Image (spheres, helix red, strand yellow):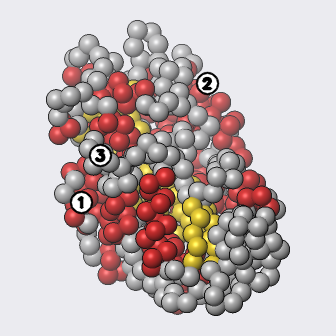
Amino acid sequence: MNSEKFKVTARSRTWAQDSRVALSSLPGVVGRRLGWMACVAWMVSSLGCASEDDGSSQGNGGSGATGGQGGAGGQGGTGGQGGGSDERIRLRVPLYPYIPDAAGDRFEAMVRRMKREFETLHPEVELELNPPCFQDDPYDPAALARGMSGENEACSFDLVEIDTSLLGELVDTGAVTPWSALPSRNWHPAAIEASTYQGALYGVPHWMCSHFVFSRSAAVANASSVSELVSALADLQTPEPDMAGNLLGSWNLPALYLDAWADTNGAGGVASAISATALDPQAISGLKMFSETCESGGLNPCLDGTFDAEDVIDPAMAKFSAGQVDAAFGFSERLFPILKALPVGADPAEIEISSAPLGHGSHPLVFTDSFMLSARCTGACADAAAAFVAYMSEATTFEWVLSSEDAPAQGRVPRYLMPAALEAYATPKLSQDRFYMTIESLMQDGVNYPNSGLYPVKNAMRDNLLDALTSP
């Protein structure tokens, strides 16, 4: 899920019985054919030592911090992994940034609570989340590798949450290392597949996202192909435009095309559709039909940049909230700005959410954001990282983050992100939220986007797709 993205009703709980798989029992391969698994719980009772601030757990130390043995000092402190029992392990973690800022405080309250809760459980660890020095593009594998390898001494980190669409390119840098085990959770199978590359598990899943349509019509919500969607929108016979959303972007448009390809051809083999030039005519046909639902008065604001602005208020979702368009499309978390912008007296219960049929069928693809471990984070640092991802994947942690408990109670709106650990949907607040229950149901059969190959060709792919969609 990136800034262009801004990345299941009841699901059978028998998944949990099948998901308790220990990686140590596997012969070195966590293959795609496994589908999904969850592995032994982290048992971390003693985590060594180091410091919080500038630098990773090996190498340069942080400002005003005391580090462990094995690393050179930074300003006011020393760095490095290891050290005596009286020292604390520093763990520096940039979180995935493109999620709803529920409190409008640049995530300060959210990060503060995460740090407080985690350090209460693990006082031997000093946690630094979202270090302000990290200003690189989280969709640039080379920039991520510099931070994880320690090449960027001013802002190195031990653990990072990234979109797994980049996984193959990041692994190829040598900056990340596989996880030896997963927290024991009921993971969505697509999240495990997305986090696995060349037989090794490189990511602990966190968030997921997919393309949805938001409407106020049961017929629109029930459309299972793009032709049914077009027909349902036409049958509304309203004066408002049919659809709003953003089709532009070097990640966004190729991702929508891959989704259209999967809807048309089935999700299996979707990686073969990644190509700058060899575009599938049927997939293009479906995506073009979908894009034409945005047309109004001879213009297409979904393709001309009208909805591409990086505003605090999403312009396409604002139009849907105000009833100025019949439907909108985007990731599930677009419900956050939709509900925030509803006029006084508007009923959220009127809003329907459905998987976006972008082709001649409906086979949803899902993105996954996962935690990647630096190859330099070993020993006590790796134990601290394991403890942190275990905390982040607890159902109770998911519940308060997804319910936006970091935001003031008045006017609070859930984030409507998709959790990769399915236990989260059974928590009290999520299980009573009809949107979350619908999202869970819709995504139970979602298949992961390819986790390599798109990054090198995305710009050329976008350009050719845009030409195909705008040609007569």
Q: Is residue 121 above or below residue 366?
A: below
* x, y percent for residue 282: 49, 36
At 37% from the left edge and 63% from the top edge, which residue is drawn? 398
Inspect the image, locate mark 1, and give the three-letter code of the amino acid beneath it. Lys
Q: Secondary structure at mark 3?
A: loop
Sequence-first disc among 3 and 1:
3
Q: Secondary structure at mark 1?
A: helix
Inspect the image, locate mark 2, and give the three-letter code of the amino acid beneath it. Asp
Q: Nearer the viewer, residue 430 or 470?
A: 430
Residue pointed to by mark 3 = 412
Residue pointed to by mark 2 = 467
At 69% from the left edge and 43% from the top edge, which residue is drawn? 457
Residue pointed to by mark 1 = 429
Q: Nearer the viewer, residue 9 or 457?
A: 9
* x, y percent for residue 220: 25, 34
* x, y percent for residue 89: 63, 78
At 44% from the left edge and 56% from the top edge, which residue is drawn? 110
Mark 3 and mark 1 in contact? Answer it, CB < 8 Å.
no
Instruction: Say which quadrant the C terminus sits in.
Output: top right
Q: Is residue 19 above or below residue 407?
A: below
Q: Nearer the viewer, residue 226 or 7?
A: 7
Q: Is residue 429 above or below residue 184?
A: above
